[in-house]
Image (tube, rainbow, N blue to C red):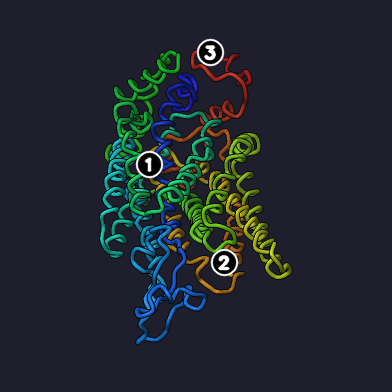
Amino acid sequence: MHLDQIVEEIGSFGKFQILVMFMVMVPKLAIGYNMLIMSYGAYVTDWWCVDDVMSNNSRNNVTYKYCSNDDNSTCSRVYDDYTRTVVTEWDLMCERKWITPIITSIQMAGVLVGAVIAGQSADTFGRKKTFYLTLLLHSILTVAIAFVTSWQAFTVMRSLIGAIIGSYLVVSMFPVEFLGYKWRPSLTVIPFWATGVFFLVLASWLMHDWTYVHVAVGVSTVPFLLGWFIVPESVRWLAVKGKIGEAESVIERVAMMNGRIKPDKTREMLIELSQEETEKTKGGKKYSYIDLYRGWKMAKHTIITHLVWWSLSASYYGFAFGVGKFSGGFYLNMFLMNILEFPVFIPVIYAMNRFGRRKVATIMFAGATLSCIGVIIIQNTVTGGQRGNIITALSLAARIFTSEAWAGLITMTNESYPTVIRNLGYGAANTAAHVGGIVAPFVFAASDNEMVPYIIVIVILGLSGVLTRLFLPETLGLAMEDILPGHDRTDDEPTTKTQNEQKTSDKYKMEGKSTEMGKTENDESTKL
């Protein structure tokens, strides 16, 4: 049984879905802002190695960004007071410069832990409870970090904030369970994240102080805590957990808000789904990450998904955290890196629904790989003033292609796992991604050879494109599974369908009017 049929009848993208998307996805602006805040925190303003005796008279071309190797040197670093970053706050230059990427990597390790915890929590205790606890902790911790007095305490707080970010990234996808298949890509392609990073650039440019930048984003999520009284629990989660009355109440509320009527057979379908789930789980099974690897084909699907997510994260955040190495101004490059996603999100949504999620993701992987190949060619053939600008432009293009490829993978991942393990599957994919995120700060810091970062990205994104095209299933138009296949079908693909499910899926592949359960057989065969 699938609930997609009910979702279509009560409105797959109406006032209810718009309200829920606003309350759940708009906080993603703050999450994107907070995730990349170390791009600003690691920004190095002008500084000099000033002699303790000569004081300001030592600020010259010789002492500008000069690291002394003499242990007996009386030189101390003095930073331009134009902006106050983490680097200037705790003097993280020269012999201490290793601390900055370590802080970022520890933050990304926290994101990994948060993704693991949230996946299990959302499938065990519910999407709504996990989501709003995450949002509350985000506000508290992000304001509290402004009061730390050492880089060690700052690192601990960033790891905790990272865990909250990882939790949000997993559990915030539950609105997809209220959407019809045509609208699911909107959750990942609409540039909430890029908009958040744009506000990070704006805030850091206006405030010039890492403490104010943190407090601003912590306070910004407080109003969305009121969504607890508005956003319901996932009807799919309620149904598979046997909470039939609550699930039916949510469906009735959705139908009313969208100006529709609750289908007559709603309760019967929910009961049947709950009974089928109870039978398959023998009345008490608790799903865990192990279920993502049961059977060879399910395990293969999960492993390949994880490899691709790892590659996307290492590349995406590698560009983001390495933006300071591009030619041009830091603020301008950060702005361009994210604002350029706006013109492409509508065409990408259309392309995903027209040509398929897998095909679009594969094309984006190819675009990113070719852009990096172009960078290496320019590095070895072009000299002069325009060389840096061309490399920056190609790097920004590679970053945008990577972002859109990731949007395709997010949609495919959510659609390929059934409801009972969807958050586990998505959480595990995020975990793999954030292992890549731990590596990301070192992609552009791994070598003084400027070609090395791009060679790394070419290899991992090129391989990911091949794996996606050859091994991951297309999910366009498929009804989302609600329960795992029976033990007799353990080796089936995650999106394999029975005959009845195939009929449902075939209906969603057709375009036009939405289905109604009460229609005649002739009506049901009409193109939707």
| C-alpha gap between disc 2 and disc 3 | 58 Å
Q: Is residue 362 above or below residue 189?
A: below
Check disc 3: other Cα within 10 Å, few if <14, some if 14-19, many if 20+: few
* SS of the residue under disc 2: helix
Residue 137 visible in the picture: yes
Q: Is residue 482 above or below residue 453?
A: above
Q: Position of residue 289 (x, y in %)?
A: 37, 50
User: Residue shown at 45%/64% (left/top)?
Assistant: 44
Q: Which mark is residue 171?
A: 1
Side of 175 relative to 516 (left or right)? left
Q: Which residue is mark 3?
A: 519
**Between marks 3 and 1 in the image, the one whose residue lies nearer the viewer:** 1
Q: Which amino acid type corresponds to the residue marked 1 in the rendered image?
A: Val
The first of marks 1 and 2 along the sequence is 1
Report the front residue among 394 and 208.
208
User: Residue shown at 30%/34% (left/top)?
Assistant: 225
